[in-house]
């Protein structure tokens, strides 16, 4: 059961990275400008954008402030759906263009 959870975390990291790139581009900011405004290193922003890191809550808030967006905008399309069947507590879910996709199941 660990494997689907690992894939789900990877998918969440990738989705966060895609959201970060989209919002940074919309704001007309480079990675360097985003780094200065957020107080983060450009390397950290690059790792987040490539889906290689999952951000902490304080990082999400700093990035949102730097991009002048709400923190929830960086989490757009990601959610957790409670599932109580087959011993699994839930699944990560993300949506794109109005359609919902199950990312993976977390083992009990």
Image: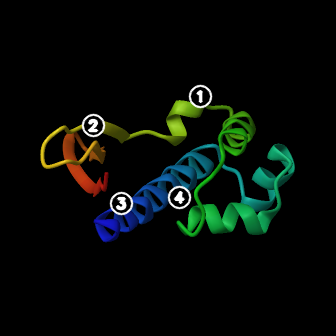
Q: Are marks 3 and 1 in contact (CB under 8 Å)?
A: no
Please give left or right for residue 24 compared with residue 43 in the image: left
Mark 3–mark 4 Cα distance, whole angstroms, equals 14 Å
Q: Residue at x 57, y 51 (%)?
A: 20
Q: Position of residue 32 (x, y in %)?
A: 80, 60
Q: Residue at x 72, y 39 (%)?
A: 58
Q: Which residue is mark 2?
A: 81
Q: Which residue is mark 3?
A: 8
Q: Are marks 1 and 4 in contact (CB under 8 Å)?
A: no
Q: Residues within 10 Å of mark 3 (few under 14, many from 20)?
A: many
Mark 1–mark 4 Cα distance, whole angstroms, equals 16 Å
Q: Residues within 10 Å of mark 2 (few under 14, many from 20)?
A: some
Q: Nearer the viewer, residue 29 or 101?
A: 101
Q: Residues within 10 Å of mark 4 (few under 14, many from 20)?
A: many
- First of labels 3, 2 by sequence position: 3
Q: Are marks 3 and 4 in contact (CB under 8 Å)?
A: no
SS type, badge 4: helix
Q: Which residue is mark 4?
A: 17
- First of labels 3, 1 by sequence position: 3
């Amino acid at each position: 059961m660990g494997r689907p959870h690992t894939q789900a975390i990877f998918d969440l990291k990738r989705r966060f990275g895609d959201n970060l790139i989209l919002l940074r581009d919309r704001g007309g900011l480079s990675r360097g400008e985003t780094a200065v405004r957020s107080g983060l290193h450009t390397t950290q922003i690059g790792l987040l954008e490539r889906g290689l890191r999952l951000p902490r809550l304080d990082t999400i808030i700093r990035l949102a402030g730097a991009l002048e967006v709400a923190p929830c905008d960086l989490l757009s399309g990601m959610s957790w759906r409670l599932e109580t069947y087959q011993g699994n507590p839930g699944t990560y879910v993300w949506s794109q263009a109005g359609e919902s996709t199950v990312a993976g199941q977390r083992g009990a």
